[in-house]
């Protein structure tokens, strides 16, 4: 990729055909929306939505003890995942800061497939390679460029999947398999994962088959309410479930990136315990960065919490200050990392924020603009 | 293609101004509402406040982003469209009518000459 040149996925023409508004997303030219964020969001919650997530990475890890090796560098107890199961994990650096999070699927006893975040593919590639055992027992392959990924999400998604690819490819939550024989002779990988909190799948296929699958899914899914969904609604859907977004809710210090200027410099440098995410952390095993996680668990001072606005007003957004009381002089107890109006909750403002010394149910104040503070309650996500 | 009524004046930031007697009525253009998509919240200025030319005095929020609204001219805010607090979608549905945002006095009529007419604004939009 040349600097400044946007990468187009294999589904680029499909997006244009669907009247997508395209934007630059981490160097990829992808749809932000097709009709509207609100409509696409609600369609995914009530029926089904389809996403081009081909910008995400796709790595294959192979070797006799591949799960044990991944476990030694990740927060998740990967060795407890049998073939056909998916999991979620963080990778921490030696100081305990999150580099990236990743969904993985165990293909067989000696093969694990992983989906690193788009902007982190080169970083994670280097990180994994730097940690490979000297004996050559583990190998990694980067399949990102040759693989297209279509996410099919929503309560009708599995029904649509069965219509398109047959009952043998109906797959449950956090299960995975090779794509079984089907009417369009497409091969690849399918897993019961996603970023919306709905039931659904992510389908990994060769680039030259991506449009065929996309068009088939639209054709059979459209009567059931399936619509293409852009990155805008992808973000509001994950926010309603309180899922972390790499680079937005945590940022690896090693990237030396300038964060949002409204946040303190190191505000997004976090470990897994601070993110408070209820899955993906097993402290019983040894892994890189564990010491900081243990310290954060013991102190429990700062955690990523949900905030639900108790009054109407401007929505919480990245960098907004959280105040203990309704006063300009109030102590600042944290900042919003992700926020916005919730399409499912009639546009009530919701946010995720790193907060110090708060308890569930506490009422706090979000400085939502220079002119307005909004009262909000500390809650546990998901919001819907 | 966006609607650009010929009887209005425009700013480069996509506000429109309609002169009604001695007052000016302010809103955002059809192009702006289309670019924002679903407006979910409008932060209105306070009545009685004096604002200067191009001062940020409110905001329009869509699901994805927030945009400041600037006063196209100096003056005093005399009335705000409070119905937008309950029905912000009026900005999408009728940006030049029910989606008006505030009414203000005109402190210096010469500032109106700095605004674009419909032809110039259309040219800026490239339409």
Image: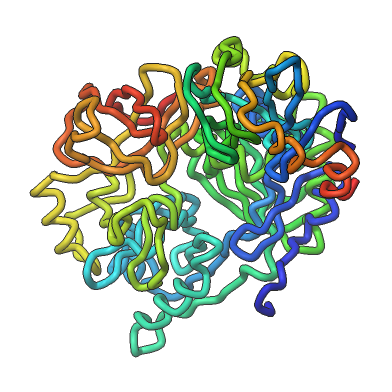
Q: Residue furthest left?
A: A298
Q: Nearer the viewer, residue A264 or A192?
A: A264
- The percent position of residue A321, horizontal first and vertical second, equals 31, 40
Measured along the vertical axis of the image, is residue A338 above or below residue A270? above
Snapshot quadrant of residue B113: top right
Q: Image quadrant for the N terminus of chain B?
A: top right
Snapshot quadrant of residue B78: top right
Measured along the vertical axis of the image, is residue A216 above or below residue A223? below
Q: Residue at x 72, y 39 (%)?
A: B14
- The mark tally for this picture is 0
Q: Nearer the viewer, residue B62 or A93?
A: B62
Answer whether residue A158 is visible to the viewer in this image.
no
Answer whether residue B38 is visible to the viewer in this image.
yes
Snapshot quadrant of residue A316: top left
- The percent position of residue A259, horizontal first and vertical second, equals 40, 60
Q: Nearer the viewer, residue A12 or A130?
A: A12
- The percent position of residue A254, horizontal first and vertical second, equals 35, 73
Q: Residue at x 50, y 62 (%)?
A: A116
- The percent position of residue A40, horizontal first and vertical second, equals 68, 31
Horizontal arrangement in the rendering, residue A206 relative to residue A277 (left or right):
right
Measured along the vertical axis of the image, is residue A376 above or below residue A158? above
Q: Image quadrant for the C terminus of chain B?
A: top right
Q: Nearer the viewer, residue B112 or A269?
A: B112
Q: Residue at x 74, y 61 (%)?
A: A9
Q: Residue at x 58, y 59 (%)?
A: A56
């Amino acid at each position: 990729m040349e600097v400044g040149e946007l990468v187009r996925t294999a589904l680029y023409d499909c997006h244009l055909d669907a009247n997508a508004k395209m934007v630059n997303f981490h160097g990829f030219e992808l749809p932000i929306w097709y009709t509207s964020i609100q409509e696409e969001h609600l369609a995914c919650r009530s029926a089904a939505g389809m996403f081009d997530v081909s910008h995400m990475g796709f790595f294959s890890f192979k070797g006799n003890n591949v799960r044990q090796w991944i476990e030694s560098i990740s927060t998740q107890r990967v060795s407890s995942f049998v073939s056909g199961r998916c999991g979620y994990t963080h990778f921490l650096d030696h100081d305990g800061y999150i580099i990236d999070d990743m969904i993985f699927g165990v293909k067989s006893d000696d093969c694990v497939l992983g989906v690193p975040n788009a902007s982190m593919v080169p970083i994670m590639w280097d990180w994994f390679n730097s940690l490979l055992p000297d004996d050559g027992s583990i190998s990694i392959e980067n399949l990102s460029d040759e693989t297209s990924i279509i996410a099919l999400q929503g309560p009708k998604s599995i029904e649509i999947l069965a219509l398109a690819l047959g009952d043998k490819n109906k797959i449950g939550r956090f299960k995975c398999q090779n794509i079984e024989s089907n009417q369009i002779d497409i091969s690849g990988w399918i897993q019961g994962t996603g970023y919306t909190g709905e039931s659904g799948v992510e389908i990994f296929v060769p680039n030259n088959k991506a449009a065929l699958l996309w068009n088939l899914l639209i054709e059979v899914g459209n009567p059931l309410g399936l619509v293409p969904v852009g990155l805008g609604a992808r973000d509001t859907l994950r926010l309603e479930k309180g899922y972390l977004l790499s680079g937005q809710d945590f940022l690896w210090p090693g990237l030396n990136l300038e964060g949002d200027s409204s946040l303190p410099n190191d505000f997004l440098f976090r470990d897994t315990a601070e993110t408070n995410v209820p899955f993906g952390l097993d402290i019983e095993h040894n892994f890189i960065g564990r010491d900081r996680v243990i310290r954060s668990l013991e102190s429990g001072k700062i955690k990523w919490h949900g905030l639900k606005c108790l009054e109407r007003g401007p929505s919480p957004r990245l960098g907004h200050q959280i105040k203990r009381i309704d006063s300009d002089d109030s102590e600042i107890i944290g900042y919003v990392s992700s926020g916005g109006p919730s399409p499912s909750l009639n546009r009530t403002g919701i946010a995720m924020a790193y907060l110090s010394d708060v308890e569930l149910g506490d009422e706090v104040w979000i400085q939502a603009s220079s002119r307005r503070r909004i009262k909000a309650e500390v809650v546990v996500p998901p919001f819907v | 293609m966006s609607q650009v009524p010929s009887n209005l004046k425009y700013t480069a930031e996509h506000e429109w101004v309609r002169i009604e007697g001695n007052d000016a009525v302010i809103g955002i253009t059809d192009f702006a509402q289309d670019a924002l998509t679903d407006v979910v919240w409008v932060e209105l200025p306070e009545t009685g406040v004096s604002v200067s030319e191009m001062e940020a005095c409110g905001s329009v929020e869509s699901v994805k982003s927030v945009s400041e609204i600037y006063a196209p001219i100096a003056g005093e805010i005399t009335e705000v469209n409070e119905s937008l607090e309950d029905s912000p979608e009026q900005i999408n549905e009728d940006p030049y009518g029910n989606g008006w945002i505030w009414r203000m006095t005109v402190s210096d009529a010469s500032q109106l000459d700095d605004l674009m007419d419909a032809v110039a604004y259309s040219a800026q939009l490239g339409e």
